[in-house]
Amino acid sequence: RARCRALARRLEDAAATPVQYMKLKAHAHAYQTHDDDDADACAAFVACLFATFATCEERFDLIAEVVATTPGVGKRERLAARVEAATRDVVARCGAPARTMAQPHKNYKVERLNDGLVCLRKFLTVEAQEWLAKSAFEVGESDAASAEAGKGFFAKTAADEGALKLNQGTRGRVIKAVDDFPGETLKELCGEAVRVARVADASLPSGFNPTTVLVNFYKDGAEFKWHKDSEDPKLIASKTGQPIVSFSVGLSADFGYKYSFDDPEHKTVRLNSGDVLLFGGPSRMIVHSVLNVHPGSMPGNMRGKMLNGRLNVTVRDIGTGVIDTSQFPAY
């Protein structure tokens, strides 16, 4: 209730006139209390939302918050679908978000795997994938000596400048600050991914502040053990942690997940180049693993744009937690 009251104040402040705000309240009430076929009520509510707040890109966060606080899973999902379609129309008409690389691919799809666990399929454009690969390899390169000390995830071999020595055999990994990546692009990609995911899943918390980046590069056939991302002790007993935002570029991989180390079974989702996986809130502490990296799965648009393998750029808001960089590359 406190969240809804705070949102109501924000909506009232943002509306151009009191009349607009009262009209929005009436449409919201009509949609939330409609019992049967609510398609017309939903359409009217969305039209009013966008007429009131979508005059500039900055208002999309308010619309996403309205969706996230709508009671009832069915009504929330129907409203989310309408909002997503209306957002695409606004983008196509005004073109404002197209000026940044953070605009998602026009054919992306949202898969809600569980509460707090969302996969954005084909979310990254080709340009965004190329930028992410180029930037990750630039910030992750080091000479052989510093790679051994954990300052980079790879070093070029002297014999062949096109070959890499990864700091963990079939896998290279390094921790970086988000500001090590050039410009604001990575932060913008994260913000847009979180915004879209929260429209589909109200259990993902707001207020994501990207601070830390974990770069992983896997050779084909590589895998990684079952583990939790638990750098903040407060998250262990919490179901409100900020999401992990995980970008995949290059080869496809099988991502396994379960909710306890003791679970005898797990679920698997295949992550392809351009996909973004987010897990936060009730799914923030999932136990997960890279089960396999599929040889020959490099998409045509990325061939020649990066070395053969799977690049995973994972961005976090670690809150009050601390990642012990001395544990790299052994972590």
Image: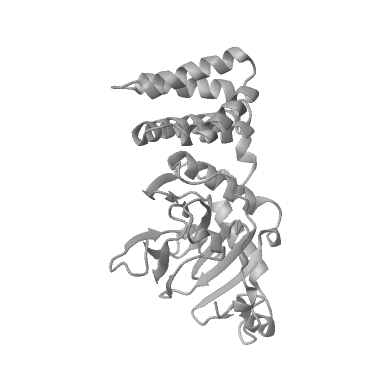
Q: Is residue 238 visible?
A: yes
Residue shown at the point (37%, 60%) measured from the top left: 270
Locate residue 83 relative to residue 55 in the image: left or right: left
Tell me where residue 108 appears, x and y as whole percent.
45, 45
Q: Is residue 42 above or below residue 303?
A: above
Locate residue 234 relative to residue 70 in the image: left or right: right
Residue shown at the point (63%, 61%) measured from the top left: 212
Tell me where residue 208 appears, x and y as whole percent.
59, 49
Q: Is residue 307 visible?
A: no
Residue 330 or residue 138, whichever sits in front: 330
Q: Is residue 60 above or below residue 316?
A: above
Q: Is residue 291 above or below residue 33?
A: below
Residue shown at the point (44%, 20%) measured from the top left: 29
Locate residue 37 relative to residue 152 in the image: left or right: left
| Residue 192 found in image quarter | top right
- The colour scheme used here is one colour
In the displayed orientation, state which residue is furthest to the bottom: 159
Quadrant holding the C terminus: bottom right
| Residue 55 found in image quarter | top right
